[in-house]
Structures are given as C-alpha cells and as structure tokens.
Amino acid sequence: MLSISKRGREMPASPIRKLTPFADMARKQGKFIFHLNIGQPDIETPKIALDAVKNNHLIILSYSPSDGFESYREKLARFYRERSNIPVETEDILITIGGSEALLFSIAAVCDEDHEVIIPEPFYANYNGFAHMIGAKVVPIDSKIDDNFALPPISEFEKKITDKTKAILICNPGNPTGYLYKKEEIEQLAELVKKHNLFLIADEVYREFTYDGLTHNSILKEKGIEQNAIMVDSVSKRFSMCGARIGCLVSKNQEVIATAMKFAQARLSPPTYEQIASEAALKVPDTYFEEVKEEYVERRNALIEALRTIPGLKVAEPQGAFYCIAELPVDDAENFSKWMLEHFQFHRETIMLAPASGFYSTPGSGKRQVRIAYVLKKQSLLRAVVILKKGLKAYQKQHGIDPESFT
Amino acid sequence: MLSISKRGREMPASPIRKLTPFADMARKQGKFIFHLNIGQPDIETPKIALDAVKNNHLIILSYSPSDGFESYREKLARFYRERSNIPVETEDILITIGGSEALLFSIAAVCDEDHEVIIPEPFYANYNGFAHMIGAKVVPIDSKIDDNFALPPISEFEKKITDKTKAILICNPGNPTGYLYKKEEIEQLAELVKKHNLFLIADEVYREFTYDGLTHNSILKEKGIEQNAIMVDSVSKRFSMCGARIGCLVSKNQEVIATAMKFAQARLSPPTYEQIASEAALKVPDTYFEEVKEEYVERRNALIEALRTIPGLKVAEPQGAFYCIAELPVDDAENFSKWMLEHFQFHRETIMLAPASGFYSTPGSGKRQVRIAYVLKKQSLLRAVVILKKGLKAYQKQHGIDPESFT
C-alpha cells in the first residue's frame, strides 16, 4: 500500500501553530485575535539590519559558503567574546538556517536511531520534532511550576542515564518556562556530562533577555566541558528577525563542527540576504538591548500581576526570555484554547494561547497549562488578560466547572 | 566515550564542495580557478526580483507561514499551470528552504529507518546525504555513459524492488547527467510505481533548461499517479537565485503535504526576503527563459565540441540542465582533480572539477568520471578545456599513463 512513513504519521504537530485553522476561522468571523501563542516580537527590527538589505548591490544572488559568510562568522565570534565574554573563534561557528537547523544538526551529529536525549520538561516543543525526525528519543525529566521550573535534581538525571543516552539538552533562559538557570545549576550539569561522557546542548537564543539584574550563564564559559558543549543560537529573538532564519551552532569540539559541516554542505548554504541583515545587526549599540530589556520587564510585570488577579490561576515567574507558563482553572487547556477561538468573543475580540501539553513529552502532563508569550505591547497584554478572565468565567459556567476547586 | 553518531561519521561529504580546501590553497598561491565544479550560474538574477527586495517596506522581519506566503503559493500554482501546463492548485504546494529541504521532507515523509529509495545513478550527490541523514537507504541502478544516461530498463528496477522499497527518485533533466527523460520513460516509471504502490519523487529543478526543441515531461502531468507523485522544485537555477534557498514540494497527495507541513512547522518558516524575491521573479517574461536557454545551448555546444578534441576523453551529450559527465583518460578522476588544484597551472590558471564518484553510490563506479557544469561564459569554458587538455597531458606524463590505452 502507498503509505506515509511511521516517522511522518507520528511526527508531532506544533502546539504553537496547531490551532491556526481555528484562528483563521475566528478571523473570518470578524474577531480580532491577541496572539499570545507565538514568540513573534512586535519590536522593530534594527534599522541598520533592514537598510543593509535594502542597500545591497548583489547582481547574482549566488550560493554562500555552507558554513555561512566568513565575514559574518568573524564578527559573530567577536560579538560573543566582547558582549558575553564567551571565548570562541570563527572556526567554532557554523551558520545555520535558524536555531531550528542548529538543533537538528546537533541532535543528528550525536544521535543514531534510538539514542536518547534527556530534556527537562516542559521544553520547546520542536525539540521533540527534530529528535523524532531523525529517530532519536526524548527522555523528559519533570520540572515543576511551583519551583518556577528550576533544574530538576541531578539525581533525577542520573536515574534516566542509560547506555543509549547521548546528550542533555537545555534551553536557557527557558522557552516556554522563562526560567534562567543559575551558575550552580550549569556547574552541576557540567559535572554530570563530564562524569557520563555526554554532550551538553544548550539552546541560548534568549541569552540577551535576562531580567532582575541577573546575568546569563553560557555553557561555553564552563571550564572542562569544551568538548561536550554545543551551543545553539539565533538572530530571531535577539534582533526581532524571526523571518531571517539565521542561527548558528557553536562548539569547541571540532569533530562536531566538521560533522555539522557535512550536513550543511548537503543543504548547500544559508540564505544570503538574511546573512547580510544579521551581519549588519551586530553593529547595534548596547543601548538597543537595554531598551528592549526594559520593555520586556515592564510587560512581564504587568502581565504577571494581571494574571495573578484571576482566581484559581497559577503562574510561574519568569526571569528571562518572554514566555510564562500559566496553569488555568479548567480541566483541559487545549479544549479551552480552541473554545476561545471558536465560541468566545468579548467586544469582537479573543485570544490565542499555546496549550502547554505539547511542550511536555510525558503524556497527560501540562494538561491544564498554557504558554503565554509577552511579545505584545503592555496595553494589549492587559486587554488580553481581561479577555482571558471573562473567557474562563464563561467556559467554567458552560462546562459546569467550579472555579473554587482550583484555589 | 564522547562520540559522534554513526550517522554523522558516515555522512558523505559533498563531492561538489569537498575539494574546496585545495581550491582555497590554489587561490592563495595566486592561481585563478575556473569553477566547473559547481552549478552556480553566472547569469544575472532578474532585476525585478532583486528590486523587490531592495524596495521592500518591512519594519519587522517576522515569521512567514510554515508553508510559505499564500500569495506566493497562489502565483506559483498559476505559473505551473500557465507555463508548463502542470495541473496544480495552491494547496498542493509547500514552500521549502531550497529544493534541498523539499527532498529531505519527501524522503522523510515516505521512509522509515532502513526503507529504500531506488535511484538511477549517477545522481545528485546530496540525495545520498538526505537519505543517510534520516536513516533511509539509497538503492542505485546503473545508467550508462554510452547511453547518454537514459533510464535503465524497467526490468532492472523490478529486480531491486523489495518490501522495503518506498520510492523511486529521478532527476529530470538530470544533474549530473544532463539527460532529459522521454515521455515513454516517464510513462514506464508511472506504470511501475502504480504496479508496486511506490512513490515517484522527481527533482525537476532544471525543468526550464531543455534543449534541441525538446520539451519537459513532468511527473505531475502523468495521469493515474496523482497520489504517487511528489515533485521537488527550486528557484535556484530557474532564476539564477541559488542563494535564495527557496524551493517547494508539490503533490496532489494531501497526506504527503500534511506530513511535510508538520516537518515544516518544526522549522517554523522559509526565509522572508527570498520569498519576496521569488514571488517577484515569477513576473519575468517568457523571453527571459528563451534567452537563457539560447545562452546555455551555445555554451553546451562549444563545451562538448571542445571536450571531444581531447584524446581518450568520453562525454555524454546533455539535452537539459547544465551539466555533463566526462570520462577522463586517467586512472582516478578525484586524484586528477586534486592534482589540478595542487600541482598544475597554465599561465597561473587552473580548473576545479567535481569528481563523479560521489554521484554514484556503488563503490568504485564513476571513478574516472567528472561532472562539468557549463555555467561560465563560452570563452571561459573554452579556456577551461584548454587547461584541462594541458593538465591531462602533464598528469599522464607524470603518472606514467599511456593516453592511447583509453582510446
């Protein structure tokens, strides 16, 4: 029989985008939707990056090197050294098509079929997708909302390590949790991967987004795990350039870089215009990051404060990135999220949420949780929380849910 | 032990780019290199495409839809219908990051670990890479230089079909062969895949490049295999936009499209600027293709004629794309190609070839062959052949090879 692969049939749909058909329908019904589901910032892309593309003089849009323009890799290495004190050289960097491809290459470089990657959950849903696509397995370790999703005890990792374990993957600061790993937590992980000869892959695409005076601890600054550490990065969030699809894989392990380079050569090269934009974006002054950070802190504070006025809702306090996980006073957050698009409106407005169950790989986990991205202006966020509050009340009433039972 | 995956270790290096370090060295020695190794056309990208990017008004470079901009997909469907009489609709098209990604998604959508894809060899080397990356196996069928690399007899395919076979993959017109499949050959393949319930994947990125008054036969025009057919396409060659990394996967099989969409959602979206350029490029008049075609025909004729003056060299006559396979009067074409970069120069000039063994998956096959891309101006091609001739003579002399033994 003509049939799709098991790989294809079982490929998880993106929890961030899977409700899109319902949103399309809502829009067709004339509803305005506040998108809390997707990490698409409304911050303007630095003009210097946009202008570099508008003023380009290309006559032939030709292939670039498979590992990206050397001039870009050089400047990027300098950016890491000077801005974040991360000791890397040009040859440690391979430019990828988004952080997505860097993740795919990282997992493919270290995992064969049935090899395992341990990831604290909830985690960025597409880790599941990339691992699934190449036949590797995600082994989740539960982190807790009551703990703000801090690193689970190392003993929990030890319990899950088998001879199939090849890597530990973290996102720091976390998407969807907003949790920023402490120095001690990174040190514990470093010790663990050294002890068990594992790779440590860190998705650090939100590195610049750390709040409350806290600083980011890159795995590349950790001494003694130079050969274990693979860092994944992207311009998407840093410069509000999600459509660029420019990321990179950074490692001192030259075997990892050489292997990723073979994968990169197969797909030929990253897109040209967006490399031009990304290279130009490196020139933004430090004040750019300070202003962006201030904006996000204000949004976060307003959002969390407003969410906490909703009876029965529990929310973890994020200290980085621009997401938070909220546990809703409903039986099933995915049903509720669909219902908000299909059946609810408040003055012709509604909200779109990302059901958090897709950020867990343990079946049934996170069923009452949603991820909220605070990438909209403060006034829009506050309005969205009002709609959420009204929606919850109406949903509870319609579904015979006692809000008291969640408090 | 901290170790790279078997997948990574065994990932084949690109035969097109693997000699790059030797070319870099040759350049540092002050040599000028004629690049016959890579299909990077020197034709200018249509101005209308370049201008669309220069005149864009984006303020936030945000994600596009995972399957690409709807306006682009709509216009592309119209382009296929009107220009090539290929009956497709918007919903049959998923925009990918280059033809490369469309190939990866196609293979991943139909193959699980150890499933097999039958491909006439020599074939575009990266098919190997994509299959390898996801654990599928390439099963080659030998096509012959003396036959201009026509489709091998269907009986040869029948012999290779097992219960693990999931698809047949062809490139039409062929890279690296330049062979343009006849209508009867496509019909034979259609019958075969229907009989055995296989997918037929066709890489048709060179569709516009057909010569000698011949027309292209798309698998999407073949009646009765609508559910089997998956077409892979790209703007890279058509519009001389290799750096765009915009391609697409086209199929009437909605399960294939839905599966590819899940893969696409995991990597979020194709690059934005290049979609703008690709959409604008569709507006080029038919005369653009005619002019480009004329140019390539002239180059092909000049190249083939010149190559045939080299004693002992055998070359297949291409009728499409812009490559040919030449069998050289040497023992090992890869050694020779390296040697041309490392040790040879003629008035400070040399050439870079793509050893063809990487386009075969049968070990030892194509050892004396190279792929030559005729993407340079006629004068450069003729000059390159002079250098090749001189180089062959010098190499034969130095290595004690009798040129007579090949004639």
Image (spheres, coloured by chain):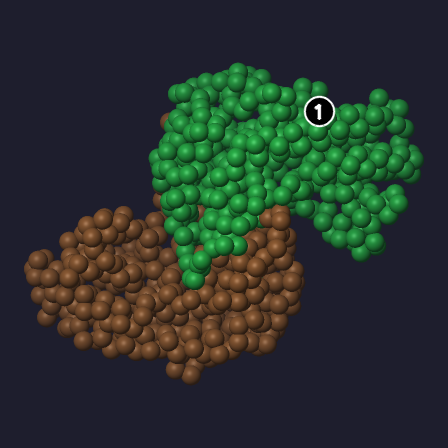
Chain colours: A brown, B green
Residue A292 lies, in percent from the top left, at 42, 74
Residue A255 lies, in percent from the top left, at 63, 58
Between residues A380 and B173, which one lies in front from this camera angle? A380
Vertically, is A96 above or below A390? above
Q: How many marks?
A: 1
Residue A198 lies, in percent from the top left, at 53, 63
Query: Which residue is tagged 1?
Result: B316
Q: Is residue B13 left or right of residue B73?
A: right
**Visible residue check, residue B127:** no
Which part of the image, by quadrant, shows the C terminus of chain A?
bottom left
Vertically, is A202 above or below A212? above
Between residues A289 and A77, which one lies in front from this camera angle? A289
Q: Is residue B68 left or right of residue B150?
A: left
Q: Chain of mark 1?
A: B
Residue drawn at x 67%, y 32% is B295
Q: Secondary structure at mark 1?
A: loop
Which part of the image, by quadrant, shows the N terminus of chain A?
top left
Q: Quadrant of residue B326?
A: top right
Q: Residue furthest bottom?
A: A213
Three-letter amino acid code at the position of disc 1: Ala
Residue drawn at x 17%, y 72% is A310
Residue A220 lies, in percent from the top left, at 56, 71
Between residues A264 and A3, which one lies in front from this camera angle? A264
**Visible residue check, residue A399:** yes
Vertically, is A389 above or below B130? below
Residue drawn at x 53%, y 72% is A284
Vertically, is B304 above or below A187? above
Disc 1 crowd, CA 10 A, few/some/many (<14, 14-19, 20+):
many
Residue drawn at x 47%, y 71% is A207
